[in-house]
Image: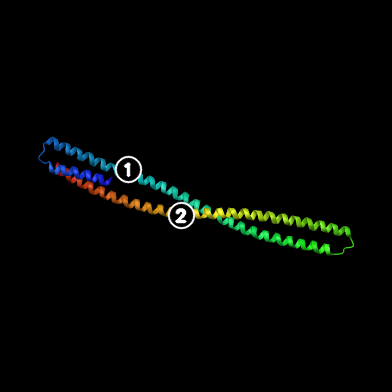
Amino acid sequence: MLLGHLEEQDEVLQCQFSDNSDDEESEGQEKSEIRRRSDSWIQKPGSVCSLVELNDIQDQTQKSGLENEGNDAKSVSKQYSLKVTKLEHEAEQAKVELTETQKQLQELENKDLSDVALKVKLQKEFRRKMDAAKLRVQVLQKKHQNSKKLASLSIQNEKRANELEQNVDHMKYQKVQLQKRLREENEKRKQLDAEIKRDQQKIK
């Protein structure tokens, strides 16, 4: 767009310098044309600035959302990792208790107790404890498997969070480049405005 305006202004200026012998009506039309183009050019940078401001607001909103999402993913990943470790410890402890109960039941069955009723009662009690320990081990193992799956998904989310952080950095870089480009275009606009004013003074 900027190059297009410059080329159009060059054409107008060339016409001005090459047609000095034209009549006053032609000269008046050329003045009007230059003023029209000048006004049009002066108005456009404002729209560019507004666009940059809008992009800046959207950029800040997106970056804030991405950073929050990244922090949430890391927090969830850490929680699942801790949960998996805790369940592993509880499962190992339950296995130890199960083994100990089985050992005690075996010792009881090998003993020659005179009180048969007591022996039967103790056997039932140990078997009940053993069944409860087995069930606990199964439940903990199931929870452990589910937590590992969730942890795996969480790791994937954390990977995505890292990618989002990289996107944020890239957006920051793009913003800097856009601001640089805007400054350059504004500087060119000022130079062109100055040239147009000088040419208008020559025509007057």
- Going from N to C along the chain, the mark reached first, 2 or 1, is 1
Q: Can you say whether 96 is above or below 32 in the image?
A: below
138 horizontally vs 196: left or right:
right
Per the image, label 1 sits on a secondary structure element best described as helix
Give the quadrant of residue 151.
bottom right
Disc 1 marks which amino acid? Ser
Badge 2 element: helix
Q: Which mark is residue 122?
A: none
Residue 76 in view of the camera: no
Q: Residue at x 80, y 57 (%)?
A: 125
At x 47%, y 54%, the residue is 163
Residue marked by disc 1: 47
> What's the distance in space between the residues labelled 2 and 1, CA to CA?
31 Å
* Callout 1 crowding tier (Cα within 10 Å): few <14, some 14–19, many ≥20: few
Where residue 130 appears, as percent x and y from the top left, is 76, 57
Q: Residue furthest left?
A: 21
Q: Position of residue 24 (x, y in %)?
A: 12, 36
Q: Nearer the viewer, residue 61 or 156?
A: 156
Q: Tell me the amino acid under the disc marked 2.
A: Glu
Circle on res. 165: 2
Query: Residue 116: x and y, percent?
Result: 88, 59
Q: Which residue is at a point 71% across and 62% down the rendered structure image?
A: 96
Q: Name the quadrant containing residue 204.
A: top left
Of 8 and 149, nearer the camera is: 149
- Image quarter hosting the N terminus: top left
> Is residue 70 at least partly visible in the picture?
yes
Could you tell me residue 59's position as x and y percent? Answer: 41, 48
Residue at x-position 47% and y-position 50%:
66
Position of residue 93 relative to residue 59, above or below, is below
Contact? badges 2 and 1 (CB < 8 Å)? no
Q: On the picture, is 57 further left or further right than 192?
A: right
